Image (cartoon, rainbow, N blue to C red):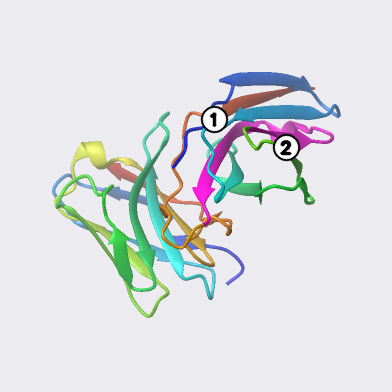
């Protein structure tokens, strides 16, 4: 597609429930990233994919968080047993390749609210 | 990734040029200089990036010092829509380089009508 697409744009869930957030990167982009941004805070790196593999998962805050990417395209970020501190905007970005010579395109994000 | 230093905030007037500075004294030879901006309630947006030579695109210009220890993002004619937080980030261009963007606090740009 023309840009990075994320769905849903907004998600309200009850504490303890599982949620899935989806990211459709730009076609042909091999690198995909997940970030989150809590209200009034900076961007926090979560995980990076090169193709379908994730060489850097260092930002995942706990084992309740997991992500996968299939077909070198769509990625899903799953949060199990959601907690109120998980409330944030979850952002996805893609890049033609992972190296620094390539710019990144971000999606508009999924605003997650855990009540 | 090497560290960058930016002013916390800057203010300018509509229709005037804006020069946003960034210091990166520990930059390595393979580091690219990237600029992104984040408008209120939106995800970050790519602005421009470069390695050694100055770069121009439809959004802005990037002026890179000869020793590459600093750079300046230039908005030629600011509009109210340019009010955002601007991030200067170094990214390793090497194959084995770190792969994620690390966002600092950036510069909050205010544009006065």
Q: Secondary structure at mark 2?
A: loop
Q: Which residue is mark 2?
A: B66
- Residue B88, image x, y percentages: 58, 37
- Residue A4, image x, y percentages: 52, 62
Q: Which mark is residue B106?
A: 1
Residue B43 seen by the camera: no
> Which of pointers 1 and 2 indicates the residue nearer the eye?
2
Q: CA distance from mark 1 to mark 2?
A: 23 Å
Image point (61%, 49%), residue name: B46
For the N terminus of chain A, the image quarter is bottom right
Whether label 1 touches label 2, CB < 8 Å: no
Q: Secondary structure at mark 1?
A: loop
- The stretch of residues the image draws in magenta is B70-93
Q: Is residue A7 above or below residue A16?
A: below
Q: Is residue A110 above or below residue A51?
A: above
- The answer to which image quadrant residue A102 occupies is bottom right
For the C terminus of chain A, the image quarter is top left
Residue B36 lies left or right of residue B101; in this view the side is right
- Residue B9, image x, y percentages: 60, 20
Q: Is residue A45 above or below residue A25?
A: above
A105, B31: nearer the viewer:
B31
Q: For residue B91: magenta?
A: yes
- Residue B78, image x, y percentages: 79, 32
Q: Is disc 1 in the same subunit as disc 2?
A: yes
Q: Chain of mark 1?
A: B
| Residue count near mark 1 (Cα–Cα under 10 Å), binned few <14, some 14–19, many ≥20 | many
Q: Main secondary structure of the magenta part?
A: strand
Q: Which mark is residue B23?
A: none
Q: For residue B44: magenta?
A: no
Residue B34 seen by the camera: yes
């Amino acid at each position: 597609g023309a840009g990075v697409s994320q769905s849903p744009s907004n998600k309200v869930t009850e504490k303890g429930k599982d949620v899935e957030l989806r990211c459709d990167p730009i076609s042909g982009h091999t690198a995909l990233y997940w970030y989150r941004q809590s209200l009034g805070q900076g961007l926090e790196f979560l995980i990076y994919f090169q193709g379908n593999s994730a060489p850097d998962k260092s930002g995942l805050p706990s084992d309740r968080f997991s992500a996968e990417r299939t077909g070198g395209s769509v990625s899903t970020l799953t949060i199990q047993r959601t907690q109120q501190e998980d409330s944030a905007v979850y952002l996805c970005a893609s890049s033609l390749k992972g190296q620094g010579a390539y710019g990144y395109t971000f999606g508009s994000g999924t605003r997650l609210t855990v009540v | 990734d090497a560290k960058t230093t930016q002013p916390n905030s800057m203010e300018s007037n509509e229709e005037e040029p804006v020069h946003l500075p960034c210091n990166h004294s520990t930059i390595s030879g393979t580091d690219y200089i990237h600029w992104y901006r984040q408008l209120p309630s939106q995800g970050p947006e790519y602005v421009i990036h470069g390695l050694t030579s100055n770069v121009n695109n439809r959004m802005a210009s990037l002026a890179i010092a000869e020793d590459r220890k600093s750079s300046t993002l230039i908005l030629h004619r600011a509009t109210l829509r340019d009010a955002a937080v601007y991030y200067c980030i170094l990214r390793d261009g090497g194959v084995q380089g770190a792969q994620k963007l690390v966002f600092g606090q950036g510069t909050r740009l205010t544009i006065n009508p």
